Image (spheres, rainbow, N blue to C red):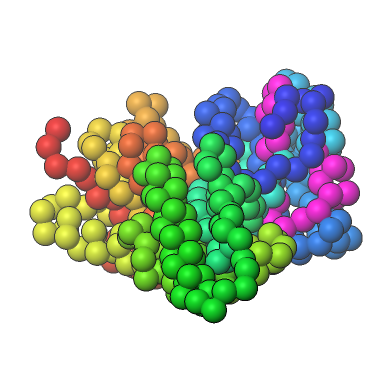
Amino acid sequence: MTGTGGGVAPTSLSAETVVLLQSIRGYPAVSLLLSTTARPVMTTADALALRRLLAQAGHRLRGEELEDVDELLAALQTHVAAATAAATSQAIAIYARSGFAMTVRLPTPVHDRVVVDPTFATRDLVSALHQTPRHVVLLLSSREARLFEGVADTLRPAPRSPFPLRNERERGPDPSRPRLEETDTAAFLTSVDRALGTHLRLHPAPLVLAGAEQAVAAFTRLSQNLSRLAGTVPALATTPLPELVERIRPVLTRYLRSRQREALDLLDRRAGGQRVVSGMSSAWLAARHERPEMLAVEHGLFYPARLSGDGDLLLPAWDVEHPDVIDDAVDELIELVLDRGGWVALVDDGALAEHEGVALTLRAGH
């Protein structure tokens, strides 16, 4: 997160990053988005593709005869150069406008493109957060418990928590040791559960249990804090965090499918009370003047549009590179709904066919 001339190292995706990018407004805000191959250093093919996006951005900006174009392109070039020499994940996004530039690594692929709009293109970031939502990972053995917070493809020790916790009871020769050891383990796991419950009350999130099968099974039997259990994965205390991230990803994918079902079920319930608005134009108007509850959007929906002078009317557009055209109004709608206290579900393509790819539920009352 830098102003132009500051550090340019790619940063991992976080909710705070999305909020920051969505808060920055002013034309031209340039977004370069590219799917990449995960490597310690960006591949030659990805680097060439990224430079092609940079050239497209330069062509568009110079064609509009804007002020400060040289400064903006210099910032983009600096970030592109840094990104090509750095590690990659599944995708990369580079953002720049006057006085600001940032590079973000994404854990999910994107639709490769250049966007020049009054706001940054953050829909892929929102989508990535939904596909890998903030979650908590409890790594368990009978002797130790460690707690991590996960965002996108990053796991970090949970801040401001009593973890790691260790079972300090001494092991020693004792004929009754198996029974005592079982009691010791149960007491230890109960203390772990209490600490986990405190953390989840303060920082609610889906939970993934990781560890040896016996320890995870024992914890599952006694825990009082599994209401948002996303799943379990096998792991050792020595399992490297990047490997743990890979094991967790399919668990979160299954969890998110249930989130999609939750969104579609909510649509069905609200439809009976006439509290569903379908289509981009209607959803935009309702999000501005009603009380948005939940926005469901198909992953593949893109909607270039023009906005009326009063901001209420959204009209589809086909001349995408014209300065008056919003490259993708879906981004703007997502930001509007989030700003107004709603939540967003990105669903499979075709799931909202009867709603033209997008549907908004409304809260009751005024």
User: Which residue is drawn at the image coordinates 44% and 53% (left, top)?
Assistant: 191
Q: Residue at position x 63%, y 52% from top?
A: 155
Residue 365, quarter of picture:
top left
Residue placed most toward the observer, 2 or 323? 2
Highlighted range, magenta: 79-102
For residue 10, above or below residue 345? above
Locate residue 219, reporting x and y percent. Answer: 44, 67
Image coordinates of residue 311 in percent, x first then y, are: 37, 30
Residue for point 31% across, 54% down:
359
Q: Look at the picture and state if 19 lies above or below 157.
A: above
Q: Could you tell me if residue 269 is visible in this image? A: yes
Percent of width and height locating residue 117: 58, 36
**In magenta segment, residue 92:** yes
Q: How many marks?
A: 0
User: In front: 238, or 268?
Assistant: 238
Q: Residue at x 55, y 66 (%)?
A: 142
Quarter where residue 348 is shown: bottom left
Q: Is residue 206 visible?
A: no
Quarter of the image with the C terminus is top left
Quadrant (top left/top right/bottom left/bottom right) for the N terminus: top right
- Residue 136 in the image, given as x and y percentages of width and height: 50, 54
Is 267 in front, or is 87? 87
